Image (cartoon, rainbow, N blue to C red):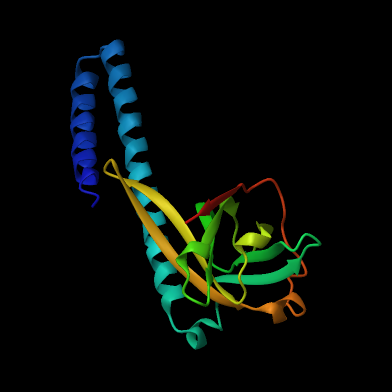
Protein backbone atom coordinates (compact mmCIF):
# COMPACT_ATOMS: atom_id res chain seq x y z
CA UNK A 1 0.00 0.00 0.00
CA UNK A 2 2.94 2.33 0.69
CA UNK A 3 5.33 1.16 -2.04
CA UNK A 4 6.11 4.82 -2.82
CA UNK A 5 8.07 4.99 0.43
CA UNK A 6 10.78 2.70 -0.99
CA UNK A 7 10.98 4.84 -4.13
CA UNK A 8 11.32 7.98 -2.02
CA UNK A 9 14.13 6.38 0.02
CA UNK A 10 16.00 5.50 -3.18
CA UNK A 11 15.43 9.01 -4.52
CA UNK A 12 16.80 10.50 -1.30
CA UNK A 13 19.86 8.22 -1.52
CA UNK A 14 20.49 9.38 -5.09
CA UNK A 15 20.27 13.01 -3.96
CA UNK A 16 22.81 12.39 -1.19
CA UNK A 17 25.19 10.82 -3.72
CA UNK A 18 24.75 13.85 -5.95
CA UNK A 19 25.48 16.16 -3.02
CA UNK A 20 28.83 14.45 -2.51
CA UNK A 21 29.72 15.08 -6.17
CA UNK A 22 28.66 18.72 -5.92
CA UNK A 23 30.82 19.19 -2.81
CA UNK A 24 33.84 18.02 -4.81
CA UNK A 25 33.01 20.44 -7.63
CA UNK A 26 31.12 23.32 -5.96
CA UNK A 27 28.28 24.90 -7.90
CA UNK A 28 26.02 27.04 -5.74
CA UNK A 29 23.06 26.90 -8.13
CA UNK A 30 23.23 23.12 -8.52
CA UNK A 31 23.70 22.58 -4.79
CA UNK A 32 20.72 24.82 -3.99
CA UNK A 33 18.59 22.87 -6.47
CA UNK A 34 19.58 19.56 -4.86
CA UNK A 35 18.80 20.86 -1.38
CA UNK A 36 15.33 21.95 -2.51
CA UNK A 37 14.71 18.54 -4.04
CA UNK A 38 15.89 16.84 -0.87
CA UNK A 39 13.52 18.93 1.27
CA UNK A 40 10.62 18.00 -1.02
CA UNK A 41 11.43 14.28 -0.82
CA UNK A 42 11.77 14.40 2.98
CA UNK A 43 8.40 16.15 3.25
CA UNK A 44 6.76 13.49 1.07
CA UNK A 45 8.30 10.77 3.25
CA UNK A 46 6.97 12.48 6.39
CA UNK A 47 3.53 12.71 4.77
CA UNK A 48 3.59 8.98 3.98
CA UNK A 49 4.64 8.19 7.57
CA UNK A 50 1.82 10.34 8.95
CA UNK A 51 -0.72 8.72 6.63
CA UNK A 52 0.42 5.26 7.74
CA UNK A 53 0.11 6.31 11.40
CA UNK A 54 -3.42 7.64 10.88
CA UNK A 55 -4.56 4.53 9.03
CA UNK A 56 -3.08 2.28 11.72
CA UNK A 57 -4.95 4.24 14.39
CA UNK A 58 -8.19 4.07 12.37
CA UNK A 59 -7.90 0.29 12.01
CA UNK A 60 -7.12 -0.15 15.72
CA UNK A 61 -10.08 2.06 16.61
CA UNK A 62 -12.40 0.06 14.38
CA UNK A 63 -11.16 -3.19 15.90
CA UNK A 64 -11.54 -1.82 19.43
CA UNK A 65 -15.10 -0.62 18.83
CA UNK A 66 -16.11 -3.89 17.17
CA UNK A 67 -15.31 -5.82 20.35
CA UNK A 68 -18.27 -6.98 22.43
CA UNK A 69 -19.82 -4.42 24.77
CA UNK A 70 -18.63 -6.11 27.97
CA UNK A 71 -15.01 -5.99 26.78
CA UNK A 72 -15.30 -2.30 25.86
CA UNK A 73 -16.79 -1.03 29.12
CA UNK A 74 -13.39 -0.71 30.81
CA UNK A 75 -11.87 1.59 28.19
CA UNK A 76 -14.54 2.66 25.68
CA UNK A 77 -12.25 4.20 23.00
CA UNK A 78 -15.15 6.37 21.85
CA UNK A 79 -18.03 7.09 24.23
CA UNK A 80 -21.39 8.50 23.11
CA UNK A 81 -24.52 9.79 24.83
CA UNK A 82 -27.97 10.62 23.43
CA UNK A 83 -31.00 12.50 24.72
CA UNK A 84 -34.34 13.29 23.06
CA UNK A 85 -36.33 16.48 23.48
CA UNK A 86 -39.70 17.10 21.87
CA UNK A 87 -40.31 20.63 20.60
CA UNK A 88 -43.66 22.44 20.68
CA UNK A 89 -43.96 21.84 16.93
CA UNK A 90 -43.85 18.08 17.48
CA UNK A 91 -40.37 17.78 15.98
CA UNK A 92 -37.50 16.27 17.93
CA UNK A 93 -34.18 17.65 19.03
CA UNK A 94 -31.58 14.92 19.47
CA UNK A 95 -28.79 16.04 21.80
CA UNK A 96 -25.63 13.98 21.67
CA UNK A 97 -22.06 14.00 22.93
CA UNK A 98 -18.99 12.11 21.79
CA UNK A 99 -15.93 11.65 23.99
CA UNK A 100 -12.46 10.70 22.76
CA UNK A 101 -10.98 8.25 25.28
CA UNK A 102 -8.05 7.29 23.04
CA UNK A 103 -4.53 8.73 23.21
CA UNK A 104 -4.77 10.15 19.67
CA UNK A 105 -6.36 13.27 18.21
CA UNK A 106 -9.43 12.69 16.07
CA UNK A 107 -8.65 14.90 13.08
CA UNK A 108 -10.74 15.13 9.94
CA UNK A 109 -13.35 12.58 11.04
CA UNK A 110 -17.11 12.80 10.50
CA UNK A 111 -19.74 11.71 13.02
CA UNK A 112 -22.87 10.19 11.46
CA UNK A 113 -26.21 9.33 13.02
CA UNK A 114 -28.61 7.20 10.97
CA UNK A 115 -32.24 7.02 12.12
CA UNK A 116 -34.03 3.80 11.17
CA UNK A 117 -37.61 2.98 12.28
CA UNK A 118 -37.84 -0.25 14.29
CA UNK A 119 -40.57 -1.36 11.87
CA UNK A 120 -38.79 -1.95 8.56
CA UNK A 121 -39.65 1.11 6.49
CA UNK A 122 -36.72 2.40 4.46
CA UNK A 123 -38.71 5.39 3.22
CA UNK A 124 -38.66 6.84 6.74
CA UNK A 125 -34.93 6.40 7.29
CA UNK A 126 -32.65 9.42 7.30
CA UNK A 127 -29.19 10.39 8.45
CA UNK A 128 -27.16 13.43 9.41
CA UNK A 129 -23.41 13.98 9.51
CA UNK A 130 -21.29 16.35 11.55
CA UNK A 131 -17.71 17.14 10.57
CA UNK A 132 -15.31 17.00 13.53
CA UNK A 133 -12.30 19.16 12.71
CA UNK A 134 -10.39 18.03 15.78
CA UNK A 135 -11.14 16.23 19.04
CA UNK A 136 -8.19 15.85 21.41
CA UNK A 137 -7.68 12.90 23.79
CA UNK A 138 -9.97 13.16 26.80
CA UNK A 139 -12.04 15.87 25.14
CA UNK A 140 -15.81 15.77 24.74
CA UNK A 141 -17.86 17.40 22.00
CA UNK A 142 -21.59 18.10 22.15
CA UNK A 143 -24.01 19.08 19.43
CA UNK A 144 -27.61 18.52 18.39
CA UNK A 145 -29.53 17.07 15.46
CA UNK A 146 -32.95 18.28 14.36
CA UNK A 147 -35.55 15.79 13.19
CA UNK A 148 -38.74 17.17 11.63
CA UNK A 149 -42.02 15.74 12.92
CA UNK A 150 -42.88 14.09 9.60
CA UNK A 151 -39.58 12.18 9.66
CA UNK A 152 -40.02 10.73 13.15
CA UNK A 153 -41.65 7.35 13.68
CA UNK A 154 -40.84 6.10 17.15
CA UNK A 155 -39.65 3.62 18.14
CA UNK A 156 -36.50 3.86 16.04
CA UNK A 157 -32.89 2.72 16.12
CA UNK A 158 -30.07 5.25 15.85
CA UNK A 159 -26.82 3.93 14.37
CA UNK A 160 -23.78 6.00 15.40
CA UNK A 161 -20.63 5.90 13.28
CA UNK A 162 -17.31 7.64 12.68
CA UNK A 163 -15.99 7.93 9.13
CA UNK A 164 -12.83 9.23 7.51
CA UNK A 165 -11.55 9.35 3.93
CA UNK A 166 -7.88 8.68 3.17
CA UNK A 167 -6.05 9.46 -0.06
CA UNK A 168 -3.89 6.41 -0.75
CA UNK A 169 -1.84 6.44 -3.94
CA UNK A 170 -4.35 8.78 -5.56
CA UNK A 171 -7.39 6.71 -4.55
CA UNK A 172 -10.01 7.70 -1.98
CA UNK A 173 -10.41 5.01 0.69
CA UNK A 174 -13.07 5.27 3.40
CA UNK A 175 -12.76 3.75 6.86
CA UNK A 176 -15.98 3.38 8.81
CA UNK A 177 -16.00 2.83 12.58
CA UNK A 178 -19.22 1.49 14.07
CA UNK A 179 -19.85 3.09 17.46
CA UNK A 180 -23.09 2.23 19.23
CA UNK A 181 -26.75 1.65 18.48
CA UNK A 182 -29.42 3.39 20.50
CA UNK A 183 -33.05 2.29 20.68
CA UNK A 184 -35.23 5.38 21.05
CA UNK A 185 -38.88 5.22 22.10
CA UNK A 186 -41.53 7.52 23.54
CA UNK A 187 -40.11 6.71 26.97
CA UNK A 188 -36.92 8.55 26.01
CA UNK A 189 -38.91 11.77 25.74
CA UNK A 190 -39.17 11.60 29.53
CA UNK A 191 -35.97 9.78 30.45
CA UNK A 192 -32.68 10.27 28.53
CA UNK A 193 -31.29 7.25 26.70
CA UNK A 194 -28.10 7.74 28.70
CA UNK A 195 -27.04 10.25 31.39
CA UNK A 196 -26.76 13.75 29.98
CA UNK A 197 -23.10 14.85 29.76
CA UNK A 198 -22.27 17.39 32.46
CA UNK A 199 -19.28 18.96 30.74
CA UNK A 200 -18.85 19.29 27.03
CA UNK A 201 -16.43 21.16 24.86
CA UNK A 202 -18.37 23.29 22.41
CA UNK A 203 -17.10 25.48 19.62
CA UNK A 204 -17.26 26.26 15.96
CA UNK A 205 -15.62 22.98 15.04
CA UNK A 206 -18.52 21.28 13.36
CA UNK A 207 -20.93 21.63 10.49
CA UNK A 208 -24.15 19.68 10.08
CA UNK A 209 -25.12 18.11 6.79
CA UNK A 210 -28.48 16.36 6.58
CA UNK A 211 -29.12 13.51 4.17
CA UNK A 212 -32.35 11.65 3.52
CA UNK A 213 -32.82 8.28 1.83
Horizontally, residue 60 falls left or right of residue 139, namely left
Q: Measured along the vertical axis of the image, is residue 165 above or below residue 72?
A: above
Residue drawn at 22 percent across, 29 percent down: 15
Query: Which residue occupies 54% across, 72% down?
Result: 117
Residue 151: x and y in percent read 60, 61
Q: Quadrant of residue 158?
A: bottom right
Q: Is residue 194 visible?
A: no
The furthest residue to the bottom: 70
- The image quarter in which residue 200 lies: bottom right
> Is residue 144 something one can see in this rendering?
yes
Measuring 34% from the left and 30% from the top, which residue is drawn there?
Answer: 40
Of residues 177 and 42, which is closer to you in this image? 177
Closer to the camera in the image, 4 or 144: 144
Q: Position of residue 59 (x, y in %)?
A: 38, 65
- The answer to which quarter of the image holds residue 12 is top left
Decide if residue 4 is on the left or right side of residue 46: left
Q: Which x, y percent locates residue 89?
A: 77, 59
Percent across and percent down for residue 55 are 37, 57
Amino acid sequence: MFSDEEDLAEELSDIEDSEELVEKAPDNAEFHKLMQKRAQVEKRMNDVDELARQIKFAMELRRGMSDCYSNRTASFPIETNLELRRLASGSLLVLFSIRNNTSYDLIGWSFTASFVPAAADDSSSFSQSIALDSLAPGEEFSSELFAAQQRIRLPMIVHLRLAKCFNIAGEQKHILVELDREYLSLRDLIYPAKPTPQSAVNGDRSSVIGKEH
